[in-house]
Amino acid sequence: MKRLTVLVVTAILTLLVTTAVAGMPVTLTVNDSGIDFETYGEHTSYIQLAFEDHQLEVIMSDTKLMSALPAIDITVPPVNTEDLFGNEVTAGNIEQVDEVELIRYGNNFRGIQVHHPGVSLKEVSTSYLAAFAKMGFTSTLDSHSNHNVQIYYLDQGDDHLRAVFHRLGDEVEAFLYGL
């Protein structure tokens, strides 16, 4: 029994040291309090990025933010359903908007995909890279990038993200993922 206890304590200490050395993975939060989900239909929304304590915050609002990121058009669907407890739900949330996709990993959001209509690949990638540079990230272009897809690795100390910008017809898809 004593040997098992020592083994378990050693395993836990190894895990803690490994986590401390490797750094915490970047997670993502979405602050969508500035979006009116009670007004159904299409509206223009704005995005701003913030980073603190291994967490990328994507701030979304129906009003202009202090950001140079291109605006997006979102469509808020009518909901009119009931929740798990039978309460009527009359407003949507960001997870029901087709133009924004949140990627979960376990209980945490680890990535976001945003569609930017009517802008160039260069405009989208340049604006996101400038936003990350203001937050202290350095960017490295992946050698597999081409004129339709640009892949960047973003680093700030122990924090790492991947940004993929993909041209799809007349829109550009921006995909941000915490590593």
Image: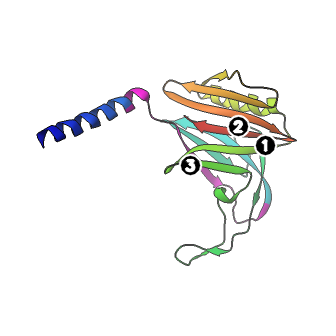
The residue lying at 18 percent from left, 41 percent from top is 4
Asked whether the residues under the numbered discs 1 and 2 touch, taking CB atoms below 8 Å apart as contact, a structural biologist would say no
Q: Give the residue type at disc 1.
A: His
Q: How many marks?
A: 3
User: Residue 67, labelled with which disc?
Assistant: 2
Q: Please name the residue that numbered disc 3 is placed on.
A: 104
The residue lying at 77 percent from left, 39 percent from top is 70
The type of colouring in the image is: rainbow
Task: Tell me how far mark 3 sits from mark 1, CA to CA.
Answer: 21 Å
Across and down, in percent, residue 125 comes to 75, 31
Q: Please name the residue that numbered disc 1 is placed on.
A: 116
**Element at label 2:** loop
The residue lying at 79 percent from left, 43 percent from top is 116
Across and down, in percent, residue 47 comes to 69, 43
The mark lying in front, picked from 1 and 2, is 1
| Location of residue 24 with respect to 101 vertically, above or below | above
Q: Is residue 20 magenta?
A: yes
Quarter of the image where one finds residue 172: top right
Asked whether the residues under the numbered discs 3 and 2 touch, taking CB atoms below 8 Å apart as contact, a structural biologist would say no
Quarter of the figure that contains the C terminus: top right
Task: Tell me how far mark 3 sits from mark 2, CA to CA.
Answer: 25 Å
Range of residues picked out in magenta: 19-41
Quarter of the image where one finds residue 76: bottom right
Earlier in the chain: of badge 1 and badge 2, it is 2
